[in-house]
Structure formats: C-alpha cells, structure tokens
Amino acid sequence: MYRHYAIGLLAIIGFIAAANSTSINLCDGVADNVFVADITNCSNYYICVKGEAIAQQCRYNYSFNGKTQSCEVSNASCLACDPSKLSSVGLERTCNKYALCFAGTPVLQECADDLQYNPNLNACDYPQNVDCVANRCSIYDSPDSIVYAPSQSSCTKYFVCMNGQPQNQTCVGGLQFNAVSNQCDRPANANCTIAAIPKSRSFQTAAEIAPRMVNINCPSVGIQQIAHQNLNQYYMCVNGKGALMTCAANLFFDKDMGACRRKEDILINYFLFLVKYVLCILVACAIFDLLSAASNSVNICSGVSDNVFLPYLGDCSKYYVCIGGAPIERKCDYDFHFDAKEQSCTYQNVAKCLPTCTNALSSFCYDRTCTKYVLCYAGTAIIRECRDGLQYNAETDRCDFPQYVDCVDNMCTLFNDPKNITFINSQASCEKYYICMDGNAYPLTCSNGLQFNKDCDCCDFVENVHCNLTAATRNILSYSKIPPRRADIDCPADGANFITHPDPAKYYYCLNGMGVVLECTPGLLYDAEFEECRAPENLSRKS
C-alpha cells in the first residue's frame, strides 16, 4: 500500500486547537511527535508537542491511520459509527482516550486517573489488564535517548520503543525491570509492585449487548454523563437520546469527573482539588502547575552487516552499501555529501567525510567497519585491515585486541527490524552491552553484580554468564604523536610495500622509495603473508 508519512512536523503551520467541543486534551499523557487521529474527520490528525494538539491534514484526500502513524490511500482505518449500535473504539497512541459511538455520533471520552482503555471490554480498565505504552513511542524517537517503558502487568516485563512501536522485552528469571535505571535488576533494587486485581471477571462489551435506551430527560443538544442510582453505572446523553452505561469491574462513576474511577481515587481527587484551590489562592495557580510538571585488495564490507553504508575514500559524494559482504557503490543526490555516522547524505557543510591524508605518518578509522583503517604517509592513503578479530584502535593508530577498542558499529544497520532488536555484547566489559537503534550502537550497563548474557540478550547472574574480560592499562603513543622512524633499508622505487623487520614486532612500510618503521601493538607480531600484525598463534608458516 502506498503511504504518505505524516511529516507535517517539519513545517508546522497548523493551529493549536481543541480536539473537539469537550475539554479533553488529546495530547495529555502523550509523548512529543506522536500523531493522534481526529475522530470527526478521517483526513485530519494532530501532532502532540509539549502536551498540545496541533491540527494537521493529510494531502491528496488521504486518510490518517493512527496505528501506522501515516496518511494512506485506503480509508479502512476511518471511524464510522453505526447509528443502530452502541460501541466504542480506542484512540490509537493515547492509551486512555476512546471514541464512544452512540446514535451515530462519535463522542471523545477519556479514562480517568491512570486507567486505560481496554479494547476487549470497550471500557476503561485497570492498567494491569491493558498494559498500553503506545503513547510513549514516537516514530521520530531520538536515537540518542532510547525510550523504555515499564510494564504495568508484570515486574519482569518492559518495553523498548523502536521505530515508533513498543517492543515487548522480558528480564531473565529472577530479575525485574528497574524503571529508574532502565535495566533488569535484582528485585531488591527494582522496587516493583503490581497491585492485585480480581482474577475472574464477567463483563460484556458495549458492542455485544443492545443499547439500553432510557427514559430520562436528556438535554436536546450536547453530550452529558449523568449519575445513576447504581454507583457503577451512569447515563450517556447525546443530543436528547440516552443510554445506560456500566463501568468495568471494581470501578465506579464519578459525577464530577464524568468518568469511571476507583473508589479511592474519587476521594483522593477531591482532597487534591481542595489543596490546589487553597494553594492557588495563596501562591497563584501558575506556581502549583509548575511544581506538577577501497584502494587495494581489502574488502571493506567483510565483517559488516547487510545494509550498512560505508564512506567512499577520496570522494565525499559517494558511498557504499554492503550487501552479502560485497560493497555496492552509490552516489548522493543534489550535490550532497555522505555522513557515515548519520548513515545518510546531507548538506556539504554538515556531512563529516573521511579525513584527507597529509604528508605526515598517521592513520584514521574507516568508519563503520571496526577492522579497516586508512594508513597515511607522504600524502598517500592506503586501506588496511586488522585480522583475526582484532580491531583498529584510533588512539594508537594500530590494530589492537578488541577489549581495548570495543567497536560494534559494523553490526548496526539503519534498517534494523524493530521487532527483532539487535543486542551486542561488549568485548571490553562483562557488564556492558549495546543496542542498535537508527543505525547506531548505544552502550548500556547491567546493574551492579549482573553481567550481560548473550544467550538470552539480557543481564543475568554472574554464575550464568561465564565472562572473563581483562584489559590492562597501557601507554602506547599514536604515529601522529611521535617522529617517524626512517627505514634503514633500500625501499622499492615504486608502489606501496610492506617488508619484514629483524624485530618480529615491527615492520617496514615503503612507499615510492621512501620508508618508515611501524610497530605492532604489544602482544602482536608481524605476519609477512598477510602484511599485518597478528596474534602469535595465528601467524602463517611464512612468518
């Protein structure tokens, strides 16, 4: 299905408006940049920004779909009220708002307190029975700040927002989600309590029963909720017609709020109202509200995940996409330049291209590969590759053991599947791990006493992980920080050549008759066959 994504966020020219004639704020409790449907017009929707609903309209007479957060050709998601039925439909991405259909008219309703709309009951219900967090997830979530949401039905369960959708995650047995540190933790640290609610309930949805029309004096115009003699029921009046409504189990109608609520919340809200009223008189309401608030044989795509974009050495307007371990050359449109960190083409003055080599001896990382780097000498750039799981260390200009580098950028693609989150274990710390989001790797740390377990992609007890990583402190100067050591051999007059040195931990680099001495990272030796430093146990027979 062809879809036109709702990106009116980029040029907001709408006006801030009420969602309908009621006082309900559509965006109350909804994260910024979440889109909410207009129940009265299929082509209209709202952008939530700082709790305000900003009106927008789909182009080309498209219809807005709250579930996909986009404008679409199909109007299948459009709300249509059947005049002969009493029913309700949850308002996507709000968790606590819904449209009540009565007498063919959609009426915006809101669950009181922290109750949520239960689509299985067509009524407000305890959050333990609904566990909705869709109001927390925006398709424009910031990759610099991963959004976590605790479950309201289980202490071991939580959600991670990925591409605007909440993805269900579960802590390993014995651990619970800590909403303060946003990680699985020991129960004593998590401080999680899920209130008990009745296990068995018998409740028919509004759509499953015939509307119980009542003979009360309903106002001829407007929408009103009127208290019933039974505390868990109330009358709904719409333009002169009335129907008897029933609250979900263990909830009672609050005539002041016009909503079903817990009994204790009805009393608490009344007390808070009195407190706020007094404070507003004494110190002004505003204060109260404020307090509430590739140049050689190196394959640059080896070891790189599919759909990861790599920069093109020597031309900022080009880039590669890695597919099946092979680089496919691409070019940016509109004279844009490629930015490896952002994985996109952008304005030339914004894009961060690969550096340009000078005459000095130096090197720099080939972005997003972890194992490739560019060796610079006499103004010439040569792509090099670390072997056997070693990674390029930008601080020392050398291939190094992964526990000193801990690079995982090659594993994260911009097109990650939000239903299959990519977790990557750290190679430097047993307690550390990464989550891929929007093409970037974000480091996280397990709670004290726990370690990351790759088998379950979760923080686990130490005895279940068997991790042993050590990284001693070292003092290795980069090539750019020390004078180059001239080669004491006759270098070939043409081309780039790597030649063995009498010291197995060193080697010569010759370029067009000039040469320097390079050193391996401590613990590595030079391999003449692979022309790179390697661990002693991996050296070829020729070395």
Image (cartoon, rainbow, N blue to C red):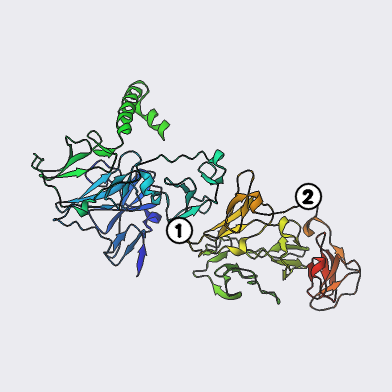
Q: Are marks 1 and 2 in contact (CB under 8 Å)?
A: no
**Label 1's element?**
loop
The furthest residue to the front: 200
Q: Nearer the viewer, residue 412 or 380?
A: 412
Circle 2 packing at 10 Å, graded few (<14), some (14-19), many (20+), is: few
First in sequence, mark 1 or 2: give its number: 1
Image quarter where the C terminus lies is bottom right
Question: Can residue 53 be seen?
Answer: yes
**Given the image, on which type of amino acid does mark 1 rest?**
Asn
Task: Give the image quarter of residue 376.
Answer: bottom right
Q: Give the vertical position of 305 relative to 23 (above or below).
A: below
Residue located beneath label 2 in the image: 473
Q: Residue at x 80, y 65 (%)?
A: 535
Q: Nearer the viewer, residue 488 or 503?
A: 503
Q: Residue at x 46, y 39 (%)?
A: 193
Q: Residue at x 24, y 57 (%)?
A: 79
Task: Give the image quarter of residue 270.
Answer: top left
Q: Give the vertical position of 28 relative to 534 (above or below).
A: above
Residue 82 at x, y = what percent?
17, 57
**Label 2's element?**
loop
Residue located beneath label 1 in the image: 163
Question: Can residue 16 be seen?
Answer: no
**Given the image, on which type of amino acid does mark 2 rest?**
Thr
Circle 1 packing at 10 Å, graded few (<14), some (14-19), many (20+), is: many
Residue 226 at x, y = what percent?
17, 37
Q: In the visual, does 4 lie left or right of 426?
A: left
Q: Give the vertical position of 443 relative to 370 (above or below).
A: above
